[in-house]
Amino acid sequence: MRQWAAPPRVGIVLGSGLGEVANGLRDAKKIAYKSIPHFPQPTVHGHAATLHLGRWGEVPVAILRGRVHLYEGFAPAEVVFPVRVLVLAGVKTLVLTCAAGGIARRATPGSFMILSDHLNFQGQNPLVGPHDERWGPRFPDMTEAYDADLRRLALRAARARRLKCFEGVYAAMLGPNYETPAEIRALQRLGADAVGMSTVPEAIAARQMGVRVLAIATITNRAAGLARRPLAHQEVMAMGRSAARNLVGLLDAVLPQMA
C-alpha cells in the first residue's frame, strides 16, 4: 500500500460480473495481483486480478477486482489472504459483493440481498490450522457476522433509490457445479434465501480481525429447480454486469457513512 498516499479505510471485494464497480474510484492506482507478493491469481472468467486504490468521494478505498474461490483448488488461507492484507493496511470496514442464485420468492434476478447471516456448507474454514495471534482470537464470535448498522444503512439507501433489496441468509456451497434441485429444496428448509460459492471465508477472516462486514449479493438467477432453463455462468456474468450500475449507486450512498 506504499504506492498510495492515504491508507484505505474501506475495502471492497467484487464478485462475478461486478468488475465495472471499480470505475467508481477517482484518482485510482491499479496494481496487478501478480506484482504483489503471495497474492493468489484468479482463474475464473469474470474475475480480473487487479487491486484498485483510490477515493470514493472523499473515502480512501481499496477494491479487489477479482477473488479466488475454494473450488479453484486454493486453500482457505489463500482465499482470505487478500482480505487480511487490506485489514493490515488499514481497512476498518469490508464490503463483500457476490453473485448468488435466488431461493426465496423475493430473490428474483436483478435484486440485491443484504446478508443477515450465512450457512457455511463449504466444508472448509480459513481459521482451521495453527493459530496466529496476529489475526485475532482463536474462537471468534459469529453472532453478528454482518454488521447490523451497516445492513440498516444499505437497506435505507436501496429503498431511497427504489432498488429491489431485502435481507436474507446466504448458503455457501463449495462448487463449482451448480446445486441440484434436491439440494435447493434442502437449503430452503434450512432457511437459506440465496446460494453461492464465495463470501463466507472472507467474512469469517474479517470478523476474526475485528473488521465490520457488509455483504451484498446480486441475485443473478433463480436457483436449480426454480428456473425454466438450465443454469449457465454466462447468464450469471450478464446479470452481474447489468446490476453493476445499481450497485454503484448503492455504494455512493453508503460509503461516505462508513469511514
Image: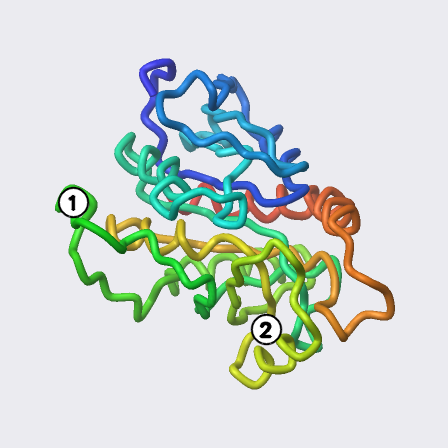
- Image point (47%, 23%), residue name: 33
In the image, 143 versus 235, the foreground residue is: 235
As drawn, is 164 to the left or to the right of 65? right
- Image point (79%, 51%), residue name: 235
- Image point (24%, 48%), residue name: 209
Q: Which quadrant is the N terminus positioned in?
A: top left
Q: What residue type is labelled 2?
A: Asp
Q: Is residue 15 above or below residue 166?
A: above
Coloring scheme used: rainbow
Farthest left residue in view: 133
- The crowd level at tag 1 (other Cα within 10 Å; few <14, some 14-19, many 20+) is few
Q: Which amino acid does label 1 sit on?
A: Asp
From mark 2 to mark 1, how far is it between C-alphas?
Answer: 34 Å
Quarter occupied by residue 88? top left
Residue carrying label 2: 193
Q: In this view, does 160 lie above or below 80?
A: below
- Image point (57%, 86%), residue name: 189
Secondary structure under the numbered disc 1 in the rendered image: loop
Residue carrying label 1: 132
Farthest front residue in view: 73
Q: Which of marks 2 and 1 is nearer the N terminus?
A: 1
Q: In this view, does 204 lie above or below 86?
A: below
Secondary structure under the numbered disc 2 in the rendered image: loop
Q: Which quadrant is the C terminus positioned in?
A: top left
